[in-house]
Amino acid sequence: MKAKWVVLTGIFGLAGAAGILIGQEKEDRTLLSQQQMTAIINEVSGERAMHHVLELVPYQFVRPPSEYQGHFRESEVMAKFAREYGFSNVAIEDYPTGQTYQPVVGELWTTTPKSVKIYDIHDIPESLASTNSNGDISGELVNVGQGTAQDLEGKDLKDKFVLSLAPSGLGGIYNRAVAAGAIGIVGISAIGAGDRSTDYPDEIVWTTVNAQPNTAAWAVSPKAARELETMLNRGQKVTIRSITKSEQVPNKQEIVHAEIPGDGSTTQEVAIGGHLFESYIKQGANDDNSGCALTLEIGRAYLKLIAEGKLPRPKRTINFQWVQEISGTNAWFNAHPDKQKVIIGDLNFDMEALRLTQSRSYWVLQRTPDTFPSYINDIAQSMMEYIADISRERVRYRGAGYRASQPVESPNGSTDAFYIKIDKHYGASDHVTYMQHGIPAVMFITWPDMWYHSSQDTPDKQDPTQYKRAAAVGTGALAALASGTDEMAARILNENIGRGLARMSESHTKGLGYMADATDAAALMDGYKEARVAVLHQVEVEKGVVNSASILWTNVNNGKQKTAAFAPLIDQRASALLNEVKAAYQLQAMQRGVPAPEPVITAQEREAANLVVESVGGGGRGGGGGRGGGGGRGGGNAGPAVPQEMNAELTILLGQHRTALEIRDFLSGEFTPLPLADLMAVLHAREAAGTLKLVPKTAQ
């Protein structure tokens, strides 16, 4: 850090020594001045963000069908606050998408051995999985365990309900049971069989089942399912009664949009936001609404600081987007194709507000994938690390008192440590959609979330201090991103250069570890090859990051000239690192008493280097492979597969006209070594399935 900031101080000056708080080091700095960051910290309010979420989703409720005829409650709340705070061009936009079902009645009972109402959707909306079901049906309950085909075999399920004890997969079990004559399912819906289902036995995780007529699917908590299992194990006859009524309503994508206008000096714009909805039936305080509550506060604070002269008005217009997750962002881009051409970056806030210690959580920055290297990651990381550092008590400052140098805490919030983590890309949120439109985007998220997608995702789990810290990070990052000045462009570029050196060093360390772990001469040779791959991969990523920063200059062509000067310097860094890798290889070989020859290309590598992968019907820049980017939710191809965390990047690489060896080296460099034989098995299987072609270079 010290060496980096020696370079930076020659380019721009931040607060002088007189402006630094007691106990605050010169290294405690970021892209804005210490004075500006202090103004941001003083203004952003964790309480206001909490107030927003309490207005949005004070409790989980059954949405009345009438809301589908007008605007949803959450949209009205966001638009009202945005107008009051002085946002410009506030609008609620609706895009019809056909018809859907909204439950209005849902009751699950046992009628024998005694009459007990287990669930009512007006108590726990997530309990009714089959939101399209209608009817008053009763049947005996049969335990089918994990609900596999073998578990159902030989059981009389005709006109009965089945009890499933599997922690997930309710829809598949329902389909198997109904095919065998059952009229419904009562089953656990949890996230796995681990901490969430054992430590939080009363929560129900949201899931959906498309029910056939005169059937129903109910999701129950692990505790409720075990109680039913106990009755059955005692030999008691258990009869289930399901009463459901749903109304067909017009479906739509509903989007709330607002702006902070730029000063008119540039056509470039930026975006920030979160999702108000993931489903109109499922609601949540952290997931869906915390990102919207937070970014609304970021905008309010930014506008006030501009009005007070504490932050300059941005040159770039800022688009605030509060949407239906992923599909709403796509609908907005489809309706406003001009925006794709002018937005240069997006900050996506997904799940932001948990009290970190209670959920065993970190506040995580998910970077762009290596297939989409971008300047934007370092803006976010710089702000996160700044707020984390000044918020913690550092023992070397104890002479000035036992305290943080600049506590970022809310009056009604915790005084917990600010646990942060900078992580690899993960998709499954709106930042992926921006990248699929060619716009760099990062995601901020609290993870793990013990109440994720569940009936217990309520405001009482949230921490105003977490909101305040996230708002300080978000406002600072947004001010840097929207600035639009050449001075800020240079600052961001220098952040990219300095942090890029650190990332190259991390890849170097990773590669040295491969050799250190080698147990014989062959493994040492492989480790040496993989170490070189890791360094060379990161070199190309960092050149891409620096090149991406050219968009930040007021004259982009001028920016390209400035950033291009660093490419050969990065190559020089790479040469030095590769020399160190070679020296380490030779040392390891000497210690093992084996030769240290330079590797030669194998026949398999030569063949892979001559095969160009051509995608059939898809691929290309995706920024994370869509819904499941970076190992997220979603399906995959049958047959041989690469490790899960590589799937999203592989999807993108398959559409980039690379050779099979280039794809292998890319995945190995970004993640961990991938055996070439494993990748070739995947490629040949997909070629046989008709989803790609392997074309020899010599044939092109």
Image: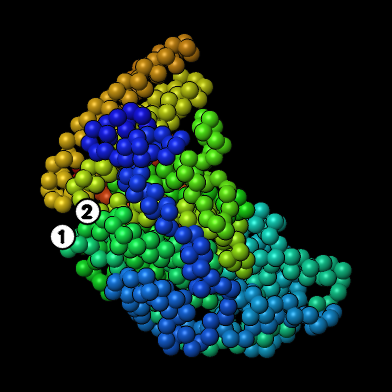
Side of 239 where 248 appears, left or right: left
Residue 454 location, x and y as percent?
60, 66
Q: Residue at x 50, y 25 (%)?
A: 517
- Position in image of residue 315 (x %, y %): 21, 58
- Could you say which quadrant of the image residue 151 lies in? bottom right
Give the crowd class for mark 2: few <14, some 14-19, many >=20 residues within 10 Å. many
Q: Position of residue 245 (x, y in %)?
A: 60, 88
Instruction: Tell me where residue 525 sits by quadrant.
Output: top left
Tag 2 near tag 1, CB within 8 Å: yes
Query: Which structural element holds mark 1?
Result: loop
Q: Which numbered disc, 2 or 1, marks the residue that appears first in the sequence?
A: 1
Please tell me whether residue 549 is drawn above or below residue 203 in the rendered image: above
Secondary structure, mark 2, is: loop
Q: Disc 2 marks which amino acid? A: Gly
Between 620 and 33, the one nearer to me in the picture: 33
The residue at 55%/57% (across/down) is 411
Q: Residue 467: image x %, image y %?
A: 49, 57
| Residue 537 vs residue 692, the one in the foreground | 537
Q: How is the image coloured?
A: rainbow
Viewer-side residue, 177 vs 197: 197
User: Is residue 681 visible to us here?
Assistant: no
Label 1 amino acid?
A: Ser
Residue 453 seen in the current view:
yes
Q: Which mark is residue 484?
A: 2
Task: Check the image and report above or below for 580 versus 420.
Answer: above
Callout 1 crowding tier (Cα within 10 Å): few <14, some 14–19, many ≥20: few
- Left or right of 170 on screen, residue 545: left
Residue ID for mark 1:
265
| Marking on residue 602 | none
| Distance between mark 2 and mark 1 Cα atoms | 9 Å
